[in-house]
Structures are given as structure tokens and as C-alpha cells.
Image (spheres, rainbow, N blue to C red):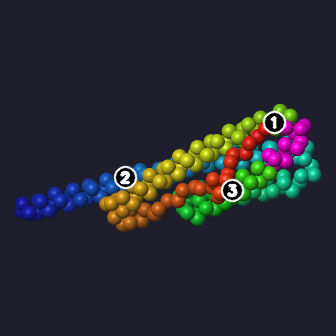
Amino acid sequence: MIVGLIFLGLVAVVLFWGVSIYNGLVRARGFENAFAQIDVQLTRRYDLIPNRVEIAKGYMAHEKDTLEAVIKARNAAVSGLKAAHGSPGDAAAMQSLATSEGALSGALGRLFALSEAYPDLKANQNMMQLSEELTSTENKVAFSRQAFNDSVTGYNVHRESFPNNIIAGFFNFKEAAVLKIEDEAKRVAPQVKF
């Protein structure tokens, strides 16, 4: 009878230990909430871009290819964000979003560079305000991406630590992927000089 009680006590301790680890893994999966902040900032960015293109159209009529490239890259980035929103942390979704974001940043950079050649466009009050909002949003995107990546890293460390890795493997807690924009070392937020 004493052996049975000791065994039952050990089973209870092991069960409590396993539940604690499982709950810790669930809490560490908070990177999904951190991705929501990226979603908010990128959506804001995507909403501002068509306004900038519309303002620029009147001044840059013969730069139609650049304006269309920006809209095409924006639409691809919106699709990438929708795919990533469905499964934050999934490596393929994060890679798709990173690739589309890199292409959008490149297209925006070309638009900003071209706008330098148009003094009337640079002096336009709406364009200056929109440029400031885009620059501010770029900073917020970078901050949100850093918070997401920190959260993903914390989750992955918690998931891979012993004995958590046993429970994580048993309950299929998969490794999460960070969001790393292509050529991030070369990527610089667009500089707006009006």
C-alpha cells in the first residue's frame, strides 16, 4: 500500500511537471501575437503606398513603369502578408513575406529616387506628409519585426531546452521561423528628402 502511494505520488509529480512544461510552451508561442503587430504596420504601409503613387502620377506621367512596379510589388507583398498571417512562424510563409517585402522596398526606393528629380513633387504638401508617414511606418515595421523575432527566438530556445524538448516533440510543437528581410544588411529604410 505504501509503495502504491509512493508510486501514485511520483506519477502525480511527473504529470504536474509535464503539464507545467506544456503550458510554458503554449505561453512561449506568444510570437503569434507579436506577428499581429507586424501585420498592423505592414497593412498601414500597404494602405499608404497607393496614395503616394496617385500623388506622384500627376508629376511623373512618363515614369509609368516605375509607378506600376510599385503597385505590383505592393500587391505581391499584401498577398505575402495574408499567407504569413495564416501561419506566423512557418518558415515558408516567413520566406515568402520576406521576399515580397524586399521587392516592395526596392520598388519604393526607386520611386523615392525618381521623386528627387521632380521639384514640384518634392514641394507638394500632401507628398511631404505622406512621405513622413511612410518613413514613420517603416520604423514601426522594423520595431515590430524585431519584437516578433525576439519572441520567436525565445519560443525556440524554450522548445529546444531539455526536458522541454521531450514534451515539445510529443505534442508536436514545431520550430518557428524568424522574419528576415532579404539582404537585410543592405536594406535601408527609404530616405525621404523634400
How packed mark 2 is, by other alpha carbons closer than 10 Å (few <14, some 14-19, many 20 or more), is some
Q: Nearer the viewer, mark 2 or mark 1?
A: 1
The answer for how far apart the CA atoms under marks 3 and 1 are is 24 Å
Q: Quadrant of residue 132?
A: top right
Residue underneath mark 3: 102
From the viewer's perspective, is residue 12 above or below residue 54? below
Q: For the residue marked with disc 2, what is the amino acid? A: Gly
> Would you say residue 116 sits in the magenta stretch?
yes
How packed mark 3 is, by other alpha carbons closer than 10 Å (few <14, some 14-19, many 20 or more), is many
> Going 31% across and 60% down the picture, which residue do you hit?
163
From the viewer's perspective, is residue 33 above or below residue 172? above
Label located before the other in sequence (3 or 1): 3
Q: Is residue 140 left or right of residue 27?
A: right
Q: For the residue marked with disc 3, what is the amino acid? A: Gly
Residue 79 percent coordinates (x, y): 68, 58
> Going 58% across and 65% down the picture, which residue do you hit?
92
Q: Quadrant of the C terminus?
A: top right
Q: Secondary structure at mark 3?
A: helix
Q: For the residue marked with disc 1, what is the amino acid? A: Phe
Q: Nearer the viewer, mark 3 or mark 2?
A: 3
Return the residue found at the far front: 186
Q: Residue 176 got which mark?
A: none
Label located before the other in sequence (3 or 2): 2
Residue underneath mark 1: 194
Residue underneath mark 2: 24
Residue 26 percent coordinates (x, y): 41, 54
Q: Quadrant of residue 170?
A: bottom left
